[in-house]
């Protein structure tokens, strides 16, 4: 089963992010609510002759993948938008159907909102070619360009998941469907910074995602 695997270092980090997002106190009721940002590191620099801290937030790097229509899709297509990202595969027999059924609810809420996008990256790159992703999208009942289903080289997809989105993905012949991965829905802001992550198989977490998206859409 997918859940029986030992959680990797990247998975531990994203669990910390989720816990941080759940436990952090938002600004007081007299202030505008804001979501936390995941800190990658804190550097130091000299300003006015004094050493000051310079916080570097975890940011999704530039990328280029093919979407379900075999059209090149890059990070520039999401400039100025918030988006929800996940990792899945079309033949997944365990968490993916639940995760995408729940994400479809989120999609329906924000459908046609030009400030919101969705990105689903396949981790089964040998079988989930663009035409298969298109058939999957159609079966899911998703139309338009707001929700993109992406294909790319395995090493690039896996590195992006583990090092940048902090989602554990692995190929495992002993696992159901041949892959082990986490069902996180990762919320990214218009500056490509990770703001929180949510278990896409848990209704309460998905509800929290939508509430946080409403907050994030109000950020300037």
Image (tube, helix red, strand yellow):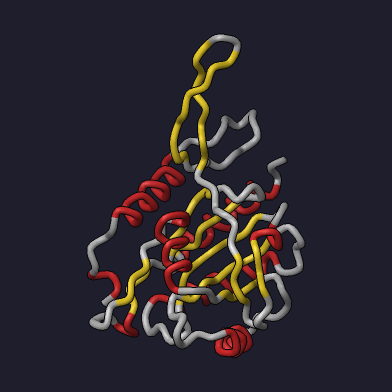
Give residue 189's position: percent from left, percent from top. Answer: 62, 50
Counting every numbered tag in the picture gives 0
Q: Residue at x 44, y 75 (%)?
A: 123
To which quarter of the image does residue 103 belong?
bottom right
Decide which of 54, 49 is in the foreground and name it. 49
To which quarter of the image does residue 113 belong?
bottom right
Give residue 168's position: percent from left, percent from top. Answer: 36, 63
Task: Name above or below for residue 19 compared with residue 75.
Answer: above
Residue 145 visible in this rendered orientation of the protein: yes
Give residue 136's position: percent from left, percent from top. Answer: 56, 86
**Furthest residue in direction top, as rendered:** 49
Residue 204 visible in this rendered orientation of the protein: no
The quadrant of the image that shows the C terminus is top right
220 on left or right of 215: right
The quadrant of the image that shows the N terminus is bottom left
214 on left or right of 88: right
Decide which of 62, 171 is in the foreground and name it. 62
Q: Residue at x 65, y 52 (%)?
A: 214
To which quarter of the image does residue 93 belong?
bottom left
Give residue 186's position: percent from left, percent from top. Answer: 51, 58
Decide which of 39, 36 is in the foreground and name it. 39
Q: Residue at x 73, y 57 (%)?
A: 115
Task: Name above or below for residue 23 compared with residue 77.
Answer: above
């Amino acid at each position: 089963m997918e859940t029986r695997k030992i959680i990797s270092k990247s998975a531990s980090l994203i669990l910390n992010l989720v816990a941080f997002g759940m436990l952090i106190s938002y600004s007081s009721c007299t202030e505008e609510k804001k979501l936390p940002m995941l800190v990658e590191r804190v550097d130091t620099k000299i300003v006015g002759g004094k050493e000051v801290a310079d916080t570097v937030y975890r940011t999704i790097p530039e990328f280029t993948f093919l979407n379900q229509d075999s059209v090149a899709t890059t990070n520039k297509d999401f400039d100025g938008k918030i988006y929800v990202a996940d990792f899945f595969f079309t033949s997944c027999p365990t968490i993916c159907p639940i995760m995408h059924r729940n994400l479809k609810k989120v999609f329906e809420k924000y459908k046609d909102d030009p400030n919101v996008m969705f990105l689903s990256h396949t981790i089964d790159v040998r079988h989930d070619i663009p035409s298969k992703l298109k058939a999957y999208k159609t079966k899911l009942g998703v139309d338009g360009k707001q929700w993109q289903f992406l294909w790319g080289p395995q090493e690039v997809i896996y590195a992006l998941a583990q090092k940048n989105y902090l989602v554990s993905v692995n190929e495992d012949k002993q696992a159901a469907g041949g892959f082990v991965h986490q069902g996180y829905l990762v919320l990214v802001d218009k500056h490509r910074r990770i703001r929180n992550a949510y278990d896409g198989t848990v209704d309460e977490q998905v509800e929290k995602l939508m509430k946080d998206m409403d907050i994030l859409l109000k950020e300037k």
